[in-house]
Image: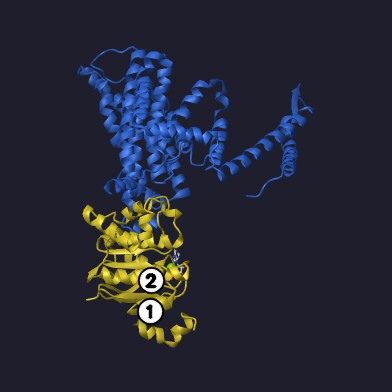
Chain colours: A yellow, B blue
Amino acid sequence: MALLELKNVSTFYGNIHALKSISISVEEGEIVTLIGANGAGKTTTLMSICGITPVRSGEILLKGQNITKVSPNKIVQMGVSQVPEGRRIFPQLTVSENLDMGAFLRRDKEGIKRDMEEVFSIFPRLAERRNQLGGTLSGGEQQMLAISRALMANPHLLLLDEPSLGLAPLIVQSIFEIIQRINKERKTTILLVEQNANMALKIASKGYVLQNGVIKMADTAAHLLENEEVRKAYLGL
Amino acid sequence: MKSRSLLADIGKSFLIAIWFMVLLFPLMVMKVNVSKGVAQVQFRWNMLPLVGIAAFVLSLLWRFALEWNEKRGNDSRAGGPLAKLKALTSQYLGIAVVRKGALFILLAFALAYPFLFGMYHTNVMITAFIYIILALGLNIVVGLGGLLNLGYAAFFGVGAYTYGLLWKYVGHSFIAAGIDPGWLFWISLPLAGIIATLFGILLSLPVLRLRGDYLAIITLAFGEIFRMVMQNSGDITGGATGISLIPRPWLFNIKLTPQKAATYIYFIAIVLVLITIFVVRRIEDSKVGRALEAMREDEIACQAMGINLVRNKLITFALGAFWAGIAGVVMAAQTTYINPDSFTLWESIIILMAVVIGGTGSIPGAIGGAILLKLLPEYFRALAQYRMLIYGIAMILVIIFKPDGLIPRKRKQYTFKEKELAK
Ligand SMILES: Nc1ncnc2c1ncn2[C@@H]1O[C@H](COP(=O)(O)OP(=O)(O)O)[C@@H](O)[C@H]1O
Ligand SMILES: [Mg+2]
């Protein structure tokens, strides 16, 4: 049984048909990537999974359980955590307060403390800046903070929305290495949304291509990297 | 920053002066005299240069002030005499003994106040205390939760009317039973808090999905609706005439003279202020308080963190309303008379101004703002007719020169100390 399964999901914004009956499945422990151009519906897909944007039809299953109509806070409690597009850290809260907010629903003080230390060991730069306001961090550091904040919920499934957005190539490189590390060391399953298809397909095992709210292609990442159409449209080759 | 040349400043001020001369011409220069049914226009030409010179000087001053403000922003770290004084006071206040001593003197002064000054000043101070409670309550909604509430006076009214109506309908049976009706005050105090909280929840329901302008308009409407209902249901609430002869708080069946009663209410108010400060500080440092701040910053990120926005907004409005309810009861007890005019939009705006001028989100700021806005008008009664104008100017000056308020919020940063101690 897949960890996450979307079956014919359709989502609307008023009259705008943003997702047109899409189906995606993510197996336990893997990195799956969802690539597509601007406005394809990638963010909408993640927001639908999290219950923030309501789904009109179809169903979303988490470990076989239907979560289509479950409220966002319950979904976080069930082990799904999102790093939203554009990072969306809390600029007026300090780094450690941002991390505290990530652990908002947890009651286990010991576990929170341990995860905080772990996050700081993954991102030593954040440890140095733990009392700095989130808004004063650089773009790369903010992305690290956003990922760390999501990890503080101790998720099984981590949803990442364009983590490379607006970052310098070197920083993107290190962020992707860390995403891989999180997947290997924490055994966290990852659904990675990206426009940077090349990088994403290189670390993923499986990929979906989204176009105008429709899944155009679904294949192993290796196959997609070889695919003529993908190479032309998304890799710029 | 670009440097402005003096000449350009003078030139612009000159243009503004001419513009004002044109603008104010019909008002300041032309004067219509009606004598024997014939209107005659009298031209007071000597006013024209006066208007021009005044506009020129004020505009030039304003430009210099702006320039000074910009410069100050650029080298705020350099430290002028003012910054040094600030550093010195904060250094001394950092020493526990000095801080405790200062607090002790302040408290002693507050306790002696009603005995040192007369009843008039005691009453003024009670009003200031009521506004401190109101400002602290609104500060939860506006400062922490980031939700604009322009109908806050309605919750204040809910508190006052809880006491008033209780007196109107239950008072006589208390007297008949031989119980001092002053007891009603002590019953109303928690009851008004609860009822105001319920109203807060009621208001939060329709505004759960709103922010910014829409929220401001809906809360404004709520405030007005409350006032209208109180005004127009005359049979129940006494309508525009309100409710009078509200009893003073019970104190061991002692009949208090007005002077003594004021002193008594003064002490009740001071205790309530201290309780409010204590509780509000606890809320700010709690997980709930942090969640409210996070909601102010980014709602979508909050949802992604599993923070329940609906519950959060409910809590925000409920917590804010509670304190307004409490303040309302004290107000009714102090004035012994309430009517809908005490709970107008203007009242909501003054409380909001106290929060903003003091420093949004800052507890000392809300206290300072409330005292400033309530005490100054009492001691400058001569300027009463310009009150709105002065408030408006003060607001503009604060927003431009001290956008974080007079006593800006200092964020607590305790994690670092903890860490150092552990090492
Ligand atoms: N809040 C919204 N209201 C209306 N339309 C929206 C909203 N958010 C996204 N859309 C529309 O839905 C489509 C998909 O958007 P999105 O999921 O953000 O795409 P992507 O993340 O792939 O760039 C776009 O056409 C966009 O204009
Ligand atoms: Mg997007």
Query: Spatial distance from mark 2 to mark 1, Cα to Cα?
Result: 10 Å
Q: What numbered label is drawn on residue A202?
A: 1
Residue at the image position 32 percent from the left and 74 percent from the top? A31
**Which percent across, then down, holds residue B187?**
25, 27
Q: Amino acid at mark 1?
A: Lys
Q: Nearer the viewer, residue A73 or B254?
A: A73
Q: Pointer 1: residues within 10 angstroms few (<14), some, or many (20+)?
A: some
Which chain does the numbered disc 1 sit on? A
Q: Which residue is mark 2?
A: A176
Q: Are discs 2 and 1 less than 8 Å apart at CB?
A: yes
Q: Secondary structure at mark 2?
A: helix
**Which percent across, then down, holds residue B62?**
65, 38
**Which percent across, then down, holds residue B324?**
36, 34
B102 shown above or below A167: above
Label count reads: 2
Q: Nearer the viewer, residue B299 or B284?
A: B284
Give the left or right position of residue A189, taking residue A165 as reference: left
Quadrant for ligand 1? bottom left
Give the left or right position of residue A234, taking residue B286 as reference: right
Label located before the other in sequence (2 or 1): 2
Residue at the image position 41 percent from the left and 42 percent from the top? B143
